């Protein structure tokens, strides 16, 4: 009698929703680990349930490690969906084949268990010809759960629901910039090309990415910039300025700054220990779901306090333009950036103007001429002499004075570190947002550097400040030698 009652109770809980099914099914997957309830698990369940019901078609979820995200999204979610819609087809992608197979096998064993079959055996009938490898299994109602690795091909399968669970391999993003960019590009191409062709119906197939954040331009970061996705973001410690609110009525319930996502699972003392072990940058990304520390990396928050709300007296300033010219179509969508800087006699540096856009060659030339006309006293015009810069210089050398080619052979971070002391010494002044609205994006990019997606504004800034700070000497030979040491020659 008790067993019959428990079966009916479990069925009723499943009908109520995924958040009620998870604690019931948990003991069959993790018998040695008690389920720790938490609002964050409920939130993940509610958003995945909205995907199953068609209320959300594009979903991003970022949560700290250890939040039961893989079990919830990869094991409980598909098995719960099959309790009422057994014909749903899933494709799961992950960077780690071992973990992907683990969760696939867990789902399969749960669905074929006596516990599951006693409750929903009349609805979902597992096929007997499933593969012991765990890459794919199906039921007799047409439901399929298929796994793939990031970058892998998927032949002959289409999904009603696609889920990328931890698509990035963290190790790939901690090495050189070139290696990281290649790895990031591979994941993005896989999601946009391979997986985008694996939909049963382009109008209804749902796509979900669930992960911890790693860098600013990881898959979640790229898709956020692209737009069109609902975003459930749950940092380990509450930040009121970043309180998450979603379109299905969810609001992060925490009210105390720094409050844990789940005190029962992540006590305050353990969070502090974890942050110390991980280091500030990794902790900010993986725990707080904010890949760039709030205070910045090289250029910290305190460096942007010197604001002016009216243009300073320019008569005694030395003015220079600084240009970073990338007008080719690039995978990362780089910008052309032109800035005007001024240095006073007492060695204060003012960012006076900026133009920025994804321009072709002709528009870039027009913008340099326009800025030169607007700021006629900015006689020095620094142009980064890479492929694009060389073409610009060749075009303008007979019509515009003061063109100075710069060959940046030093690394970007080295150049940023070279001018960082000017910020630290309160010698750099920037316009207010009311005076120059573009300053918001400029500041954001500098604070994100070197973790951010773009660095064009950083390059133009460091180029200008190096030149202006070295020009304090009256000896042209000293200036030229200083520039040669940093940039590799003029």
Image: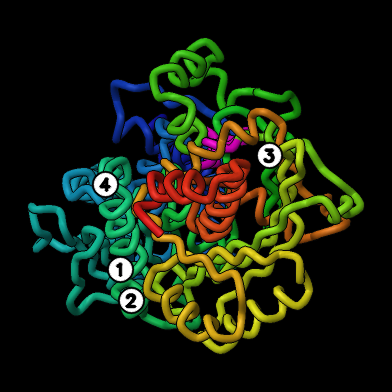
**Residue 193, which numbered label?**
2
Label whose residue precedes the other's in the sequence (4 or 1) = 4
Mark whose residue sits in front, 4 or 1: 4
Residue name at image x 85 percent, y 55 percent: 315
**Which residue bears the numbered disc 3?**
252
The residue under label 4 is: 172
Q: Please tell me the numbered disc located at residue 260.
A: none
**Residue 30 picture quarter:** top left
Residue range in magenta is 288-299
- In the figure, 129 relative to 479: above or below? below
Q: Earlier in the sequence, mark 3 or mark 4?
A: 4
Are dots 2 and 1 in contact, CB under 8 Å?
Answer: yes
Dot 3 or dot 2: first in sequence order is 2
Residue tagged 1: 190
Residue 68 position by quadrant: top left
Taking the image as drawn, is residue 258 in sight? yes
Q: Position of residue 179 (x, y in %)?
A: 26, 52
The Cα atoms of the two marked residues, 3 and 4, are separated by 32 Å
């Amino acid at each position: 009698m008790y067993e019959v009652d428990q079966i009916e109770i479990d069925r009723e809980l499943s009908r109520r929703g995924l958040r009620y099914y998870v604690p019931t099914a948990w003991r069959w997957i993790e018998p040695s680990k008690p389920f720790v309830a938490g609002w964050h698990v409920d939130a993940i369940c509610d958003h995945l349930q909205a995907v199953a019901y068609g209320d959300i078609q594009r979903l991003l979820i970022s949560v700290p490690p250890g939040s039961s995200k893989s079990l919830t999204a990869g094991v409980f979610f598909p098995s719960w969906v099959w309790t009422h819609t057994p014909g749903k087809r899933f494709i799961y992608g992950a960077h780690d084949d071992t973990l992907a197979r683990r969760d696939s096998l867990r789902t399969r064993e749960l669905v074929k268990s006596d516990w599951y079959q006693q409750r929903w055996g009349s609805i979902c009938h597992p096929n007997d010809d499933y593969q012991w490898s765990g890459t794919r299994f199906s039921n007799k109602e047409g439901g399929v759960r298929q796994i793939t690795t990031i970058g892998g091909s998927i032949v002959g399968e289409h999904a009603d629901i696609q889920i990328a669970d931890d698509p990035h391999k963290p190790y790939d993003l901690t090495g050189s910039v070139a290696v990281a960019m290649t790895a990031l590009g591979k994941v993005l191409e896989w999601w946009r090309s391979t997986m985008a062709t694996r939909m049963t119906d382009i109008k209804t197939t749902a796509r979900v990415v669930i992960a911890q954040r790693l860098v600013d331009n990881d898959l979640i970061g790229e898709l956020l910039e692209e737009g069109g996705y609902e975003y459930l973001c749950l940092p380990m410690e509450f930040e009121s300025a970043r309180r998450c609110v979603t379109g299905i009525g969810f609001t992060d319930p925490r009210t105390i700054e720094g409050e844990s996502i789940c005190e029962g699972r992540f006590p305050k003392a353990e969070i502090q220990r974890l942050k110390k072990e991980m280091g500030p940058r990794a902790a900010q990304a993986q725990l707080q779901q904010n890949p760039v520390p709030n205070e910045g990396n090289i250029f910290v928050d305190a460096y942007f306090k010197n604001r002016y709300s009216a243009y300073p007296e320019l008569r005694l300033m030395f003015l220079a333009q600084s240009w970073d010219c990338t007008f080719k179509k690039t995978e990362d969508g780089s910008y052309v950036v032109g800035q005007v800087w001024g240095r006073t006699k007492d060695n204060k540096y003012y960012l006076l103007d900026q133009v920025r856009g994804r321009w072709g060659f002709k528009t870039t030339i027009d913008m340099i001429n326009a800025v030169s006309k607007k700021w006629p006293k900015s006689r020095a015009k620094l142009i980064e002499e890479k492929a694009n810069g060389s073409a610009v210089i060749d075009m303008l050398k007979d019509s515009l004075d003061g063109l100075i080619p710069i060959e940046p052979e030093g690394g970007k971070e080295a150049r940023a570190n070279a001018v960082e002391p000017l910020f630290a010494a309160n010698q750099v002044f920037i316009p207010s947002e009311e005076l120059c609205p573009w300053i918001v994006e400029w500041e954001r990019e500098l604070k994100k550097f070197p973790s951010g997606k773009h660095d064009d504004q950083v390059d133009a800034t460091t180029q200008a400040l190096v030149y202006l700070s070295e020009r304090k000497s009256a000896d042209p030979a000293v200036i030229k030698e200083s520039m040669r040491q940093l940039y590799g020659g003029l």
